[in-house]
Image (tube, rainbow, N blue to C red):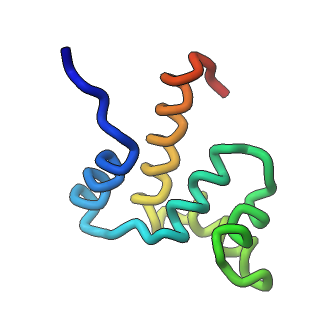
Amino acid sequence: MATRKTIESRARDIEEASGRKLTQRQKEFARLFVDGRHSNAECARQAGYASASASVQAAVFLTSGKFPHVTEYINELREDRERRFGVTL
């Protein structure tokens, strides 16, 4: 029986594939974003980004294509949530 990979091991896979590290702030932003309780800007603020630039930072992560490893991590977190709870957005 195959064991499911943990989120951390999938994060390492993403980092290897992209050649870029996920920072703790990026991981926290992704976790808060997938949680869905806060606005994008508030997720960035709570993850530790400056209040003055939080909305811009969130938009860059989600739409610019400059951080594909962050969006891939967000997708992994969503898939994990779907597997655990059997629901989709």
Horizontal side of residue 19 vs 21, given as left or right: left
The part of the image, by quadrant, that contains residue 36 is top right
Give the residue furthest to the left: 1
The percent position of residue 31, horizontal first and vertical second, equals 59, 52
Residue at 29%, 48% in the rendered image: 9
Horizontal side of residue 42 vs 62, given as left or right: right
Horizontal side of residue 4 vs 2, given as left or right: right
Q: Is 87 situated above or below 78?
A: above
Q: Is 17 situated above or below 46?
A: above
The percent position of residue 53, horizontal first and vertical second, equals 73, 82
Q: Is 22 situated above or below 49?
A: above
Residue at 78%, 64% in the rendered image: 42
Residue at 60%, 69% in the rendered image: 60
The percent position of residue 37, horizontal first and vertical second, equals 79, 47
Residue at 31%, 69% in the rendered image: 20
Quarter holding the N terminus is top left
The percent position of residue 75, horizontal first and vertical second, equals 49, 42
Quarter holding the C terminus is top right
